[in-house]
Image (tube, coloured by chain):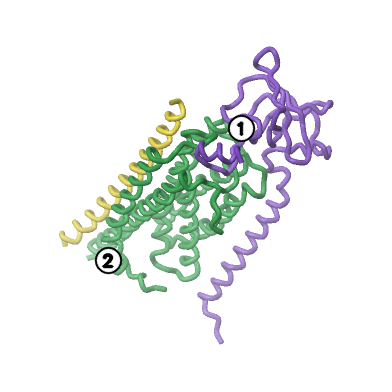
Amino acid sequence: MHGYANPARFLKIARPATGWLLGIGLVLLLAGVIGGLVFTPPDYLQGETVRILYIHVPSAWLGMAGWASIAAASISQIVWRHPLAAVAGRALAPAGATFAALCLATGSIWGRPTWGTWWEWDGRLTSMLILFFLYLGYIALASAERERGGEGRMAAIFGLVGAINLPIIHYSVLWWRTLHQGQSISVAGGSTIAPEILWPLPLTMLGFTAVFAAVSLMLMRADLARTKLEARLRRSAAE
Amino acid sequence: MMVRPKHQRLVLVTLAVAAVLGAVLLAMWGLQDRAAYFVTPSDIAAGKAEPDTAMRLGGMVVEGSLVRERDGVSIRFDVSDGKAVTPVAYRGITPDLFREGSGVVAEGRLQPSGLFVADHILAKHDERYMPPQMANEVAAR
Amino acid sequence: MNQWSFVIAAYAVVGLGVAGLLAFAFVTMRRAERAADAVRRRR
């Protein structure tokens, strides 16, 4: 479990991985976006606005996957006191918050021509907005704890409890009647999106995910470098 | 055997997560009716909707029920959820995706007569996405 | 054509958002790693 606890060993992998993930992610994104804007047909009802799907769905996925990762980091922080867990939690939050915000923004831009409204307080939209606010709270809490030199336990508890919102977002369209449509793609493999329209989506999903991972690694490296710098300054001050 | 603190913390975390999850699920279940974004024609038929209070009505626009009044901006249509039907009257511009056979959410008030007077109409999109040719083929079948 | 303006707006928002996030992460990392290296060299 603590195999990569040593920051030096982690950095040995993280340094080359950052560039690779970023490169692969941008290539996939370029392919997916060109496919989604040029080569796919419009939808029979929505027309061209269906193309927002290729950026809205990955944003929603990463907004939620980001918090799931924070929750996983929180568990390994609370239970195993993994030395990199708090670093990972702090690094994941800005990327997750950005994608949650992009999910809300693109959804709003899609909703205006499709539903006839920018915003409605239905179950799905509201729970996603709450996720965005949870990210802001987590960022404030985690950075305050870091400044105080804490271990990040308060942030970890917040990250774990906040994960309750994830099943609420996911099942909101099933539990309550919402304006937002039900899910189109299920884990069981079914899809109510025609293959001609669907194919760029996996490309942008993987692309955004790789960029997300690259951003998280960059912020982890920044955090570790800051810790190193602070330790060195303390040491030279003591000498 | 000594209980290692690591295991103790694991059990604590598991219990805490289970407790919070249980509490939230209970709350969600209790909220089910209140958190619903709209009522259905069945709810109205069952007398669950109070007349003259603001609410949203959701369902499908019944095929062939859409009537445009002579003034050009007023429309009437029926909303169905498969079990019951509610007539709706509306005055204004409808969204592009509003059409017969499609989902709709109407905001307004239920009259004691059973007519739902809407002051705002939203189109509800479903989870199916397909190109126009394919939609024609589906319709032709 | 009107529909395209919504599509372009959505892609522009996401493009700016992701580019901003990447720039922020990259600059933060660069600055922190440079500062850490500088202190090591000074010693």
2 or 1: mark nearer the eye: 1
Which quadrant, please, contains the N terminus of chain C? Answer: top left
Q: Going by the picture, which residue comes out furthest to the front?
A: B141
Left or right of B91? Residue A98 is left
Say which amino acid is labelled 2: Lys
Asked which secondary structure carries label 2, the reply is helix
The residues tagged by marks 2 and 1 sit, at their Cα atoms, a distance apart of 53 Å
Q: Chain of mark 2?
A: A
In green, which chain?
A
Which quadrant, please, contains the C terminus of chain C? Answer: bottom left
Q: Going by the picture, which residue comes out furthest to the bottom?
A: B1
Query: What residue is pinned by disc 1?
Result: B123
In yellow, which chain?
C
Rendered position, B23 above or below A46: below
Rendered position, A21 above or below B64: below
Identify the hue of chain B. Answer: purple
Q: Position of residue A56 (x, y in %)?
A: 47, 43
Q: Chain of mark 1?
A: B
Q: Position of residue A212 (x, y in %)?
A: 38, 52
Q: Are marks 2 and 1 in contact (CB under 8 Å)?
A: no
Residue A187's image quarter?
A: bottom right
Q: Going by the picture, which residue comes out furthest to the top?
A: B71
Left or right of A33? Residue A100 is right
Say which amino acid is labelled 1: Ala
Q: Position of residue B133 (x, y in %)?
A: 51, 37
> For this rendering, which residue is in front, A225 or A148?
A225
Query: What residue is pinned by disc 2?
Result: A12
Q: Position of residue B41 (x, y in %)?
A: 76, 36
> For this rendering, which residue is in front, B134 or A143?
B134
